[in-house]
Image (cartoon, grey):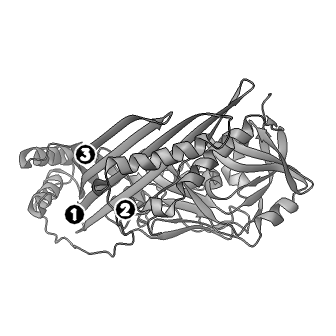
């Protein structure tokens, strides 16, 4: 790590030349990425990231710079340029003491990535490969990706913050392709956690691989999904990606502070059905999106966003907080030191309700069961979304019947959450990478099984 005296000089230089707030973010990170295709290791890469980001504020103006040249002369030169770019107020005298608060580590790691041999990681990948490949003779190709990293960070600022954290994450991603009668379909499953190699003591690797293969095999000969407005039951776990994308991003200060969100200025107002409550919680032990502190050094916390349909909170970083006149919620995140932090989700999910999933299906005369969600696109300012359903089934007479493919869910986030009329008790979370202004970051999405009373479904011709 960089010495405390040098960091204090960097912060002082920013203030001296123009800022009213200064921050240093130091990162050291070790990554491993492997890819296995057709049972053979196709690529393997490891690398270390090392660098510093320096940021200054003047009122609501922010300047960010970064460097991987860590000698004193260069760091002070970068700090000076940040201050001069702000360049109106000059604080010649600055005194502050760092508050080196030791936080309890909620995310215990037992087997760090560097301590595990490459062949052990490849063995996990091969187990996944053969489980997926042998699931069905329809499976023609399996691609396995393995990723882990060990990141150490230090954040210090002119308010006296001095905070350190170590984040270890591990993920296995399985992609299976089925082919039959000229049709091809892909299934995917990508579980991960804020753990080391012990993650594979918890994860059933073979079952995870079969899940990806099942999706592909069942969808390859499925009939086209019906189109039109209808009730849609969305399964738990990764089904929460719709809330994450179509609602969650619109609750981040990044958009709220600019008034570019449909939820701006609506605190205390009813924005969802009464059965809907949602939170963002970065304190869940060893969850994929968890951390002890955010990337501005603020301790993370459980943030209630919607409480029984009422909007009660936003996700706020320091700059967003300045612009909104509100405090940080510990929600500042960034991909690495080359990105300035901004407000982001961590583990975001709809809370469980009172229904068993079977009750929700039985109460639906006709509709679509979205078992596994795929990718999609969202316009944060309007909440308009378009999501592909990777695995879907028809619901007829209160029962799940035949598989259908090509379904797309189309709507507006703020309208859809008002049309949720049943919430299950089977909450679960899925893992993904979330992209926004501050880069791609690990994020959990989640929910129990829910029913949307009406949503537009786009289908496709077979």
The numbered dot on residue 48 is 3
Task: Determine crowd level at label 1: few under 14, some 14-19, many 20+ residues with C-alpha closer than 10 A.
Answer: many
Instruction: Find disc 1 in the rendering and name its residue.
Output: 158
Which quarter of the rendered picture does the N terminus lie within? bottom left
Q: Where is residue 137 in the image (x, y as percent from the top left)?
A: 68, 36
Q: Nearer the viewer, residue 245 or 306?
A: 245
CA distance separating discs 2 and 3:
21 Å
Q: Which residue is drawn at 10% across and 58% down?
A: 6
Q: Is residue 145 left or right of residue 158?
A: right
* Mark 2 vs mark 3: in front: 3
Q: Which of 265 and 378 is in front in this view?
A: 378
Instruction: Determine the image quadrant of residue 26.
Output: bottom left
Q: Position of residue 300 (x, y in %)?
A: 41, 68
Q: Which of marks 1 and 2 is nearer the N terminus?
A: 1
Instruction: Find disc 2 in the rendering and name its residue.
Output: 294
Which quarter of the rendered picture does the C terminus lie within? top right
- Relative to 54, does residue 328 appear above or below in the rendering? below
* Mark 3 vs mark 1: in front: 3
Q: Where is residue 210 in the image (x, y as percent from the top left)?
A: 62, 48
Instruction: Name, please, the residue furthest toward the left.
Output: 73
Task: Determine crowd level at label 3: few under 14, some 14-19, many 20+ residues with C-alpha closer than 10 A.
Answer: few
- Relative to 24, does residue 293 appear above or below in the rendering? below
Q: Residue at x 27, y 51 (%)?
A: 29
- Looking at the image, do the residues carrying marks 3 and 1 touch, with CB atoms under 8 Å apart? no
CA distance separating discs 1 and 2:
17 Å
Q: Nearer the viewer, residue 193 or 21?
A: 193
């Amino acid at each position: 790590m960089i010495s405390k005296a040098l960091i204090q000089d960097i912060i002082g230089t920013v203030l001296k030349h123009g800022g009213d707030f200064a921050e240093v973010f130091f990162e050291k990170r070790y990554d491993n990425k492997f890819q296995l295709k057709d049972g053979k290791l196709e690529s393997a890469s490891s690398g270390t990231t090392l660098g510093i980001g320096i940021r200054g504020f003047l009122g609501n103006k922010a300047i960010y710079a970064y460097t991987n040249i860590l000698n004193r002369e260069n760091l002070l030169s970068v700090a000076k340029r940040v201050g001069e770019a702000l360049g109106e107020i000059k604080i010649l005298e600055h005194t502050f003491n760092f508050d080196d608060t030791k936080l309890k580590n909620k995310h215990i790691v037992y087997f760090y990535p560097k301590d595990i041999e490459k062949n052990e990681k490849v063995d996990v990948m091969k187990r996944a490969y053969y489980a997926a490949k042998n699931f069905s003779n329809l499976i023609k190709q399996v691609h396995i990706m393995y990723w882990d990293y060990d990141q150490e960070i230090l954040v210090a600022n002119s308010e006296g913050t001095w905070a350190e954290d170590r984040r270890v994450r591990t993920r296995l991603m399985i992609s299976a392709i089925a082919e039959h009668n000229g049709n091809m379909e892909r299934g995917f499953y990508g579980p991960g956690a804020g753990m080391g190699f012990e993650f594979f003591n918890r994860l059933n690797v073979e079952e995870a691989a079969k899940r990806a293969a099942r999706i592909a095999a069942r969808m390859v000969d499925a009939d086209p999904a019906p189109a039109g407005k209808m009730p849609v039951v969305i399964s738990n776990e990764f089904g929460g990606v719709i809330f994450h994308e179509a609602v969650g991003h619109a609750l981040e200060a990044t958009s709220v502070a600019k008034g570019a969100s449909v939820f701006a200025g609506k605190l205390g107002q009813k924005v969802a059905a009464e059965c809907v409550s949602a939170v963002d919680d970065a304190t869940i032990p060893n969850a994929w999106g968890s951390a002890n502190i955010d990337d501005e050094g603020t301790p993370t916390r459980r943030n209630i966003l919607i409480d029984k349909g009422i909007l009660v909170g936003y996700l706020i970083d320091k700059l967003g907080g300045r612009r909104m006149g509100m405090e940080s919620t510990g929600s500042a995140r960034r991909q690495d030191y080359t990105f300035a932090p901004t407000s982001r989700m961590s583990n975001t999910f709809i809370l469980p309700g009172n229904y068993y999933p079977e009750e929700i299906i039985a109460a639906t005369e006709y509709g679509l069961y979205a078992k596994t969600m795929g990718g999609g696109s969202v316009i944060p300012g309007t909440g308009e979304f378009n999501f592909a359903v990777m695995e879907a089934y028809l619901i007829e007479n209160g029962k799940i019947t035949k598989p259908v493919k090509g379904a797309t869910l189309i709507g507006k986030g703020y309208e859809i959450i008002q049309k949720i009329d049943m919430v299950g008790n089977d909450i679960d979370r899925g893992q993904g990478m979330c992209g926004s202004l501050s880069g791609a970051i690990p994020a959990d999405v989640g929910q129990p099984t829910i029913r949307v009373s009406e949503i537009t479904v786009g289908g496709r011709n077979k």
